[in-house]
Amino acid sequence: MGRLLRPLLWGTTYTRLLHLWVPMFLVSVWLFIDMSRPWVPALLVVPVGLIPAVRMGEGVQAQLLLLPPGERNSGISTAHSSTWRDRWRTVLWLEIRLLLGAAAVYASVWLPVTSVDLVSTALGHPQHDDNPLLWHLNPPWVYGVLAPVPLIALYATVLGLGHVITAAARRLLGPSAAEQLAALEERTEQLLERTRIARELHDSIGHALTVAVVQAGAARAAGDPAFTERALDAIEETGRAALTDLERVLGVLREAERPASSRPTLADAERLLESARASGAKVDAEVTGAVDAVPGPVSREGYRILQESLTNVLRHAGAVPVRVRIEVSRGTLALDVRNPLPGATPGPGQGSGLRGIRERATLLGGRARTGPDEGEWQVRAELPLR
């Protein structure tokens, strides 16, 4: 019994009833004008429903009055009608809302009145003999026994109409195919953005920590004050650059629409090369072609690929000679980083950093190879410029 009566405690039960009543207030205005043609409001809502903004207004009402608080902002659209199909769905929704509203008002008025009439008739004082919901029963006390029935019917009607109008709203005011596709694309972009931010944090902070560890170890082993001074300067510079990158990435998290143009590109590659040199690596770099003309997305991802490649060199091989080749030609950006293999040859393409390099290249329609090649460790990426 408690489960059946629980909806009486739900605020949604009463807001749904209010939603059903609202259009009847407008219908009642027309009935004061011309009661002989009550069907006119059903015709008037047709041109109204074809107005694109009406769908947004109906969606806002439905979300606030029909859905429980935990389910709002889902299942019912609050966008304007973008297609004729959406407009006609809105028209159908308005017609159904009028029909169900009329049923709700009729039940809300006549069922309580019938209950009162049953009690009055049982007491020998009938109030509305013409009530079509009254029956001719004998003896009179039977009317008193039946008095709760209309109230129970009212309760069931209110709940039933509330569920029906909510289901109709989800069906007719729900997102269109275009809106569902746009929402899916937005969700995909958010997931890609989260993956990109995770990669950037790995690449940037990982690079800075690797340089700092290598520099500190080299300074301790050298025992040379001058070398220690240079190592501290390199650690400070790398740490400052990492903090800048960290602030930028956190800014992206705080500001979803922050422009990607603020991210470093291959035009800033000299900073990476100098950082690697300061860590003891002998970097032989050669740049061919117009790097400044590389499109922004390709240049930014190329920078991160180069950064991760140098980080891997310092992390796994230490201060060794590194050969860097950056070439822009025939619609392709080619990055090639080579260094002598460390004592223990790693497996091909292991590690999240190397996997991130291949993922970056794939997302841009290019390809990347990581692994041993002719006695050296090679990272080679080819990215199309279009």
Image (cartoon, helix red, strand yellow):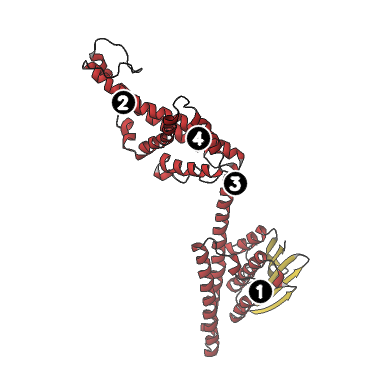
Mark 1 or 4, nearer chain start:
4
Q: Secondary structure at mark 2?
A: helix
Read off the residue under disc 3: 181
Q: Secondary structure at mark 4?
A: helix
Q: Residue 103: horizontal and vertical position, in percent? A: 42, 27
Q: Residue 323: horizontal and vertical position, in percent? A: 69, 75
Instruction: Give the amino acid at mark 3.
Output: Leu
Mark 3 or 1, nearer chain start:
3
Q: How far is the residue under mark 3 from the one under mark 1?
A: 37 Å
Mark 4 or 3, nearer chain start:
4
Quadrant holding the N terminus: top left
Mark 4 or 2, nearer chain start:
4
Mark 2 or 1, nearer chain start:
2
Q: Secondary structure at mark 3?
A: helix
- Hey, which residue is sitting farthest top in the picture? 138
Q: Which marked residue is nearer to the observer: mark 2 or mark 1?
A: 2
* Residue 267, disc: 1
In the picture, residue 149 is in which quadrant? Answer: top left
Label 3: how many Cα within 10 Å (few below 14, some 14–19, many 20+):
few
Quadrant holding the C terminus: bottom right
